[in-house]
Amino acid sequence: MLFIAPVSVLLFFIDGLGIGTRGSHNPFDGLDDAAPLAIFQDEPAVLHFNGLLAATDARLGVDGRPQSASGQTTILTGINAPAAIGYHKQGFPNQALLDIIREHSIFLQLKRAGIDEITFANTYTQRFFESRPRWISATTAAVEAAGLRFNVLDDLRTGRAVYHDFTNAMLIERGEIVSLRTPEEAAEVLAGIVAANQFTLYEYFITDKMGHAQDFDAARRVLKMLARFLRSLLAKLDLNNATVILTSDHGNIEDLSVRNHTLNPVPSIVWGRHRESLATRIRSLTDITPSIVDVLTKGTYTHGQSGQADSARASS
Ligand SMILES: [Zn+2]
């Protein structure tokens, strides 16, 4: 049996991206160059670089529309957060969700397993440190609780970090002295970060804002740029060594006829050498963190039962 050694993993998180139906409500319908993000219900997906799609349940057995705070907590911990608190929590995590993140985040689980080359690729601005917001994101709480270093603008300027708006346009609008990046230039930076770490998280949330704004043309512009960024990133990564998992917390941008989140499943798309076992295993948002922890601590076999992992290391 051939063993695949533990390698690097990128979790590419996109807020508010579901698998929708075709129609004038869906900005993906008829949009050129939106692969691999343009995925429609009951249609085979066009996925570059041998990606595999795992339609993923974001409702988690709890009534109501899936929301960001509880969905992101679930993605980042493997714990069914809406079930734990009894509802889907919007926006930023409350104390109960923060308690879950601060005890069980993927960063902490990896650190406890001896995986310490871990990074959150996104950049924070000085404003965050000078006047800390009262409410922080699930990701920020996870980074902080694991004692990871926050990337700052100097990291971005020296090509060691990306901004959530990977083009840097929003930073420039705010008066920060940084250079505009093409999606290809940003992809080069993120690919370098992935290669230098065992686990990298990247977070993108303009998709969710576009979904709430219901601005069809703006949504299409954003989706095309994001797809370009992703395709370029996949082309630059060594997918024999890197595993990429794209996922989302809930649907939104795929249905602009409603301002709210949708009840649609979200696309988890996996690339790289562990893609087959991951695509078999990921069924709900609770599966993301344990899958990543297993890839990085145990590896998977190339044949035998799909998704089967073993505690042996590469050397054994
Ligand atoms: Zn939202």
Image (cartoon, rainbow, N blue to C red):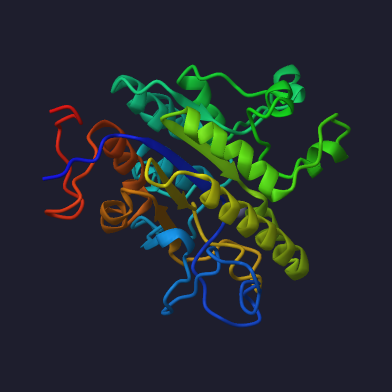
x 60%, y 52%: residue: 232
Where is residue 58? Give x, y as percent.
42, 57
Where is residue 13? Give x, y as percent.
52, 47
Where is residue 50? Give x, y as percent.
40, 61
Relative to the observer, which residue lies in front, 143 or 159? Answer: 159
Relative to the observer, which residue lies in front, 83 or 227? Answer: 227
Image quadrant occupied by the N terminus? top left
x 62%, y 41%: residue: 188
Quadrant position of residue 220: bottom right
Q: Is residue 201 above or below residue 145?
A: below
Q: Is residue 301 above or below residue 207?
A: above
* Image side of residue 280 versus residue 30, left or right: left
Q: Is residue 307 above or below residue 296?
A: below
* Image side of residue 267 versus residue 168, left or right: left
Q: Is residue 313 above or below residue 299?
A: above
- Count of marks placed on residues: 0
Relative to the observer, which residue lies in front, 309 or 265? Answer: 309
Quadrant position of residue 157: top right
Most extreme residue toward the bottom, as rendered? Answer: 23
Q: Is residue 197 visible?
A: yes
Relative to the observer, which residue lies in front, 113 or 259? Answer: 113
Where is residue 233? Give x, y as percent.
56, 48
Q: Is residue 51 visible?
A: no
x 55%, y 69%: residue: 38
x 68%, y 54%: residue: 209
Image quadrant occupied by the C terminus? top left
